[in-house]
Structure formats: structure tokens, C-alpha cells
Image (spheres, rainbow, N blue to C red):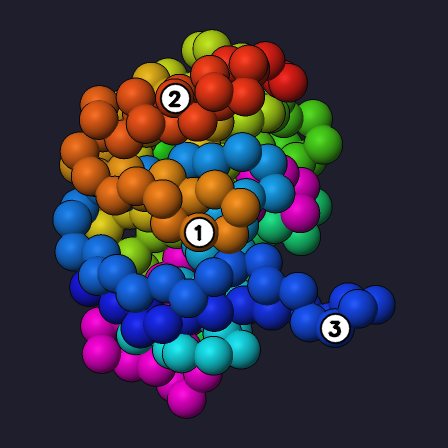
Amino acid sequence: MIVFEGATVSVPGPDGDRRILEPLSVTLAERRIAVIGANGSGKSTLLKLINGLVTPTAGRVLVEGLDTVKAGRAVRQRVGFVFTDPLSQLVMPTGLEDVELSLRARLRNPTERRTTALGVLERFGLAPLAEQSIYDLSGGERQLMALAAVLAVDPRILVADEPTTLLDLRNERRVRRLFSGLDQQLVFTTHDLEFAADSDRVLVIDDGRLVFDGDPRTAIDHYRGLHLDAGKLPGDDR
């Protein structure tokens, strides 16, 4: 369970502090939660609060009862984070080495670590690509490698920031199928409203504020309404 208690994020500006996320109080307990909103609305900041990549300037965020500021390390052991661009996350020459890196703290024995890493890649259908350079992989293969590296340590919660934005249709479907089969609680941002509709609950963020929170179809209709009022459909800028 994830709890936001008046969580606020401000950044310094030339005319004083500027809020990029207004005070947010909400409890997230559902298995699949989507966060939608325009670029720059604050949805990525909301996600980064969950594992302490960003810390609140006021209020607090609790993950399974742990404060993300006071118990940041313990929170990050429970929360896996997947970035939009997998190349910002894959730091080793091959996917196999990246998964091994994720497992290093848990498995000290190199042989056991490699065997486990190969098993993880097999689970995701990536074993044939284990020792291929990450730069020779397709965008979808890289995203799956990044997911494998994060999920290798069995986080209790997975947070994903626009995980399908850079993917073609085939790989988008592949990632969505993978997400649908996960045991972890999943919180993700997306501009793909069909993907958002797969969730149990949708949060709509606009200009740093939570403006709607509810079932997927009603939330998506609300989001479309925000953009229709401005004379622009979501996705027109893609």
C-alpha cells in the first residue's frame, strides 16, 4: 500500500519556489494503477516520490508503512522503478550483465548469480539475447531487459514511467501482456489511454494537481474533456 499524506514538491525559481506537485493526499491499494496527464503535469514527479527518487518538500509518502525519506533504502528494496528510456537504466554492456548487477547484493557467488540471471531472462523470453550488446537490441527488447533487471530482485511494487512510449505496436503489446501477468502492485504513467484502461484505477494529474481519481473509463473521459475544452485531443502532440 502506498500512502501520500499532503505530499508536495517545490523547486527553486527566480521568483521564489515553484510547486510542481500540489499537496496530494491519496492511498493507493489497487493492483494496477495508471496515472495520466499532459507532459509537464507532474505525473512523473508523483511516480518518483514512491521510491524516493524525489522527496517531498512538505508532507510525506509511506510505502508499506515506511517513510520514503526516513527509510529510503528499505523503500527502494521494495519498489522497482522502470524509466521511459531503457538506455538510461541499462548500464552494463549486455542484458545478462545488467541482471547480474541487480542480483549482486543478494547473491554473492558469481556462478549462482549468473545461473539465476539466465533463469530470469528465460522467464521473460530473453535468454537468446542474454549476451548481445544492448545497443544491438530493438527498443522493445531493451525495455524488456530493463524490466527483467528490475524484477530480478522481486520488488513488491513496480513503478513504470511511460514504459511503452518508445515502443512499436508489437512490443507495446508484449510489455502490456507482461504487466498484466505480474504479481506486483503496479503504478505506471502513460499517454496511451488504451493501456490506462487496463488498470483498476486511474489518477488524472493536471498542472500539478490531482483533478480526478476513479475507474478507468470515467477518468479517461474526464481527461479527454480537459483537452477537448482546450481544443486539443490527447495525443495530438505525439
Please indicate whether residue 156 sits to the left or right of residue 12 in the image: left
Q: Tell me if mark 1 has few (under 14), some (14-19) or many (20+) residues whose alpha carbon lies within 10 angstroms of its own.
A: some
Write down the region rendered in magenta. Answer: 63-88
Residue at (42, 66) in percent of width and height: 23
Amino acid carrying mark 1 in the image: Arg
Q: Quadrant of residue 36?
A: top left
Q: Quadrant of residue 13?
A: bottom right
**Residue placed under numbered mark 2 in the picture:** 225
Amino acid carrying mark 3 in the image: Gly
> Element type at marker 3?
loop
The mark that comes first in sequence, 2 or 1, is: 1
Note whether 147 is above or below 117 in the view shown.
above
**Residue placed under numbered mark 3 in the picture:** 16
Please indicate whether residue 64 sits to the left or right of residue 142 in the image: left
Can residue 65 be found in the magenta stretch?
yes
Image coords of residue 96 (percent x, y): 53, 46
Image coords of residue 105 (percent x, y): 45, 74
> Element type at marker 2?
helix
